[in-house]
Amino acid sequence: MPAHAGLVRDARALRALLAEQYPEARPLAERDAAATAPPVRTGHAALDAAFPGGGLPRGKLTAWAPGGGATGVLRAACRAVLAAGERAAWVDGTGARSAAWTGTWSPYPEALAFAGPARADAPLPLLVESDDRTDALRCAEHLLRAAAFALVVLEPAEGGGAPQGTETVRLTRAARDGGSALVVLTERGSMAALRVASRLDARGVRWRHGPFGPAAPVAVRARVQARALGWHARAEVVLAVAGYDLRDALEPGRDRRGGDA
């Protein structure tokens, strides 16, 4: 009986065989990513490897389900983009998240390798805050069409703030025309080239110990799942937990509880 040179017995061995002997036989999502501009790196090798082409696809929409450390991962990705010499922008449709960029990051080394320390002089992405849904979507479209940002993140307000129908079409076209990687924090995956979901691992929390035992969390592990046409991969990342100073009620400026001080 003749030997079968290409005999494999499991899916992992099959993927390795295809990559080695049939390099042109790649998933559609990966081939499409390779035919365009290089993807946007997130700064974490394991996470980039979970995305087709090795990063967030430029000129396309990525739908990232909110929660489960999504904003933490994407903030770290924005910092990685800035560290690489490119521009990033964050459109905050909630109108109240700018404080998240000024927190003090944990000194846990594995988390710092991904998130990076939040120094006072650390560069920040262009932050756009708007509690008006239509205005937030327009701002995101303007940023995409400007063709000046490698990464644009849109964080819609909860309860119907995400783009729908023709709004999604306009943003997707703007991302294609401007060549930016567009990430929208939404459960809706319509027209998305890449769908991502993440969840926090309760067993992966690292604590800072005090004299009476664990005092505060300093890092948490997140599990990320990425799906595209012909693509399904997972990754684990460690995020630092940021701490914030409590706001004094007598401080001037906007009160995040809804009023003005």
Image (tube, helix red, strand yellow):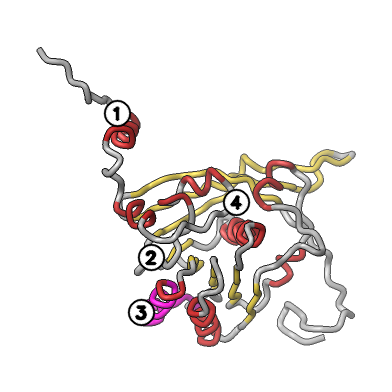
Which amino acid is tagged 4?
Answer: Gly
CA separation in Å, label 4 and label 1: 32 Å
Looking at the image, which residue is at 59% across and 56% down?
73
Which amino acid is tagged 3?
Answer: Gly
Apparent side of residue 77 relative to residue 59 in the rendered image (left or right): right
Q: Work out which quarter of the rendered image holds the C terminus and state it.
A: bottom right
Picture coordinates of residue 183, whole percent (x, y): 49, 66
Q: What element carries label 3?
A: loop
User: Which callout, 4 or 1, points at the residue further toward the start of the chain?
Assistant: 1
Picture coordinates of residue 158, whole percent (x, y): 54, 74
CA separation in Å, label 4 and label 3: 32 Å
User: Which callout, 1 or 2, points at the residue further toward the start of the chain?
Assistant: 1
User: Magenta stretch mostly in which secondary structure?
Assistant: helix
Front in this rendered view, residue 98 or 176: 176
Instruction: Count residues near mark 3 (Cα–Cα under 10 Å), then give few for <14, some for 14-19, many for 20+.
Output: few
- In front: mark 4 or mark 2? 4
According to the picture, the residue beneath numbered tag 2 turns out to be 192
Q: Residue 43 carries which label?
A: 4
Q: What element carries label 2?
A: loop
Residue 33, magenta (yes or no):
no
Which amino acid is tagged 1?
Answer: Asp
Q: Residue 10 carries which label?
A: 1
Looking at the image, which residue is at 87% across and 79% down?
251
CA separation in Å, label 3 and label 2: 12 Å
Picture coordinates of residue 35, whole percent (x, y): 35, 57
